Image (cartoon, rainbow, N blue to C red):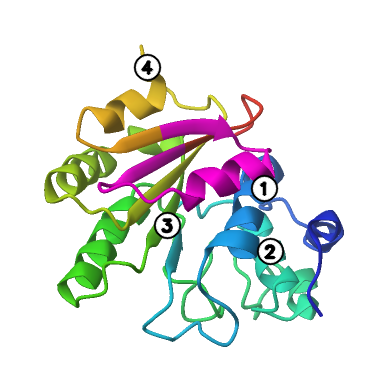
Amino acid sequence: MSRTYAELGELMTLMTGDEKHGPSATSTLDVLWVLYDRVLRVSPDTVDDPGRDRFLLSKGHGPAAYYAVLAAKGFIPESWLAGFGSAGSALGYHPDRNLVPGVEISSGSLGHGLPLGVGLAHGLIARGVPTLRVFVLVGDAELDEGSNSEAIVYAGAAGLANLVVVAVDNQSSSYGWGPGGIEAHFAVSGWSVTRVSGRDHLALAEAFGAVPERPYLVVAEVEGKLS
């Protein structure tokens, strides 16, 4: 049974524990819902289909919202949620691609998702399917990692138009980004950029629906200083 957005809170309350990282998870909730409800060409029946879009949760240290959305959309049983983080559970504190249907990468060590997304996007173009898109969800503080800077520069130079980065900006970066914010860091490397409210479903859907002819950054701004 498919759930609605209004029921996600109920699903998230089934997951408990000190390592839930609630604020980190809830900062991504609306982005995840809009992607899986309106944008991504993937379903529980097509998680292994070569013709699917790819979604990579690089912000993997707070996956509770991700698990709730996967359960709401039928990728995993709702009964799994109550076991979150327990011994023997498939739902760890970091998502595991070998245990959770629909999870494309095992993540949690920040700074890895975007470089992996660059490789996936490049691979799809090499295979002759550039219309399949790769979405990578990162946190603003995660962009302090040097591996991301290299990936941003390379993706822009390679013109990976099938790559979309969604940066959840809750002002938790240690260093900040100076004039122009996060998007200026991407734009100087040849990315198309936009900033929208990370709680506005219509604005998010419209932003994700755009298909620029170069790699694309969507900054999803949410309430600040969460984690």
Q: Report if residue 199 is visible in the image.
A: yes
State the mark number for residue 30.
1
Contact between labelled residues 3 and 2, with CB atoms less than 8 Å apart: no
Label 4 amino acid? Gly
CA distance for labels 3 and 4: 23 Å
In the picture provided, is 68 more to the left or to the right than 40? right
Q: Are marks 3 and 1 in contact (CB under 8 Å)?
A: no
Q: State yes or no: residue 222 in magenta.
A: no
x%, y% of residue 151? Answer: 22, 46
Whichever of labels 1 and 2 marks the residue nearer the N terminus, that label is 1
Mark 1: which amino acid? Asp
Say what secondary structure mark 3 lies in.
Answer: strand
The residue to which callout 3 is attached is: 135
Q: Is residue 106 visible to the viewer in this orientation of the structure?
A: no
Quadrant position of the C terminus in the picture: top right
| Residue drawn at 32 percent across, 24 percent down | 184
The stretch in magenta equals: 194-218
Q: Position of residue 39 (x, y in %)?
A: 55, 61
